[in-house]
Image (spheres, rainbow, N blue to C red):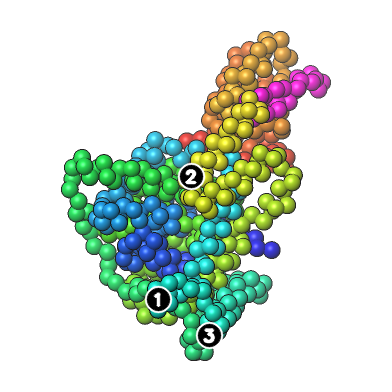
Amino acid sequence: MFDLVASRTQNIKNDVLSGLTVALALVPEAVAFAFVAGVEPLVGLYAAFMVGLITAAIGGRPGMISGATGALAVVMVDLVAEHGVQYLFATVVLMGILQIGAGVLRLGKFIRIVPHPVMLGFVNGLAIVIFLAQLSQFKFIDEAGKEQWLQGDAMAIMGGLIALTMAIIYFLPKLTKAVPASLAAILTVSLVVIFGGLDTKTVGDVASIAGGLPTFAIPMVPFNFETLVIILPYAVILAAIGLIESLLTLSLIDEITNTRGRGNKECIGQGTANILTGFFGGMGGCAMIGQSMININSGGRGRLSGITGALCLLAFILFASDLIEQIPVAALVGVMFMVVLGTFEWSSFRIMGKIPKHDAFVLILVSGVTVATDLAVAVVVGVIVSALVFAWDHAKHIRVVTSMEGESKIYRLHGPIFFGSVNNFLELFDDIANDPNDVVIEFQYSRVADHSGLEAIDTLAERYIAAGKKLHLRHLSPECRRLLRKAGSMVEVNVIEDPNYRVASDRLA
């Protein structure tokens, strides 16, 4: 019912219009996260512009949107409160250097081995966080300075406009896809409020977004060891959170669009963006799952969508702040609510009783920790728990069932092939000299998880070639076929039956 668009086709019109939609949704998010971090609104807006532009241009995932995020803002607030905004800028520069280092060291591939229950927990947890973040828009500050919920007509107008926004987004694509539904909804609801004279909160009530071009400036901090001691712990945490959120969002978009982003390239793109952002007065950022889903759902697939979003945001700051400030917050909340519905994996309720109990536990644990703390902690906890469960239950078991079909000997593998099981895998074929001249290895019930598994297959192929045997490999994924060096020509292709899964490898990252 709330499935996101899964088209792989890039289209200039769709990229431009979806980029404009994203830019409109970025404004209140960037302002809100700036407030969370304790900095001026323009610091958040400049970060959204610069990080969004640079990562769209040189990052590893076309169609993904980056900018100032809440996950980073909650870490920044203590630094800004204790040492000031200049130390934040210096920290963002160091954060970017660390992220580039992660890309150069080719660490991005490891996101491919994050267990699926952790991914589901990440998606569900982020959807809940996005939903909870919108609830602040239903509140106001009273004369006593206390936060109160909207009442009466104000709440009714807010709810009605949100419902109208969501209805347009849901029903318009059934009539036409010429214009992104989210953009049409924002424009329609804005016109209703302006010409209907409705009294409701607008972007301008949150903060003014008017400003000039960001200017280059070296952070005004002492360049000594004491400063490094202050900023290094924050930079490490921010770099880790930023990369984890970005790479998980990259993986999510990969699944939705059935394409593949490049994790190591994204690390370098994020790092470059944060270094420049720190020198131009921005608070830094990373991938934004909410805005990325808006972009994908609006048809944005290419780099042009992210570039358009960033340039439109800058245009809003420079030239159109008066117009943008008239957009009702309810329209943007409605867009985000539809993102929540499209992002949350509703199928997880259906499969909860069918999957192993430990997978269900990890899914719920990661979702809860994401909401209670932050994404980085949740993913680390989920991966550790999953690894412990895997080690305890499976202990890296891999086995083979052999049979004869005519003159060919069939090896049917059962279990994953990865760095921990490659020795056992190779030991299964310790009698190559006595095998017949025609040997088939069947991977239908197995899966190659990483580069070590591929190397093991290549090693086995070399042994059979040296023994003068003919080897056939069946039911390997397309990525395995691309990555195998020695055994690539031995793979038998069956488009209908062959699996399609990802392999953690530097050559595709």
Residue hosting label 3: 192
Sequence-wise first label, 2 or 3: 3
Nearest to N terminus: mark 1 or mark 3: 1
Indicate which disc, 1 or 2, sits on the residue closer to the N terminus: 1
Q: Name the residue under label 1.
A: 144
Query: Which of 482 and 73 lies nearest the eye of the viewer?
Result: 73
Does residue 239 appear in this view?
A: yes
Question: Mark on residue 104?
Answer: none
Which of discs 1 and 3 lies nearer the camera? The answer is: 1
**Residue at figure coordinates x 33%, y 57% from the top left:** 283
Would residue 194 be found to the left or right of residue 357 on screen?
Answer: left
Question: Which residue is situated farthest in the front direction here?
Answer: 144
Between 298 and 101, which is closer to the camera in this rendering? 101
Q: Is the magenta stretch mostly helix, strand or loop?
A: strand
Relative side of 135 to 73, left or right: right
Give the vertical position of 389 relative to 402 (above or below): below
**x and y, in percent, of residue 387 in the image:** 57, 33
Please state which amino acid type lies under the numbered disc 3.
Val
Which residue is disc 2 drawn over? 377
- In the rendering, at what x and y percent does residue 77 appear? 35, 56
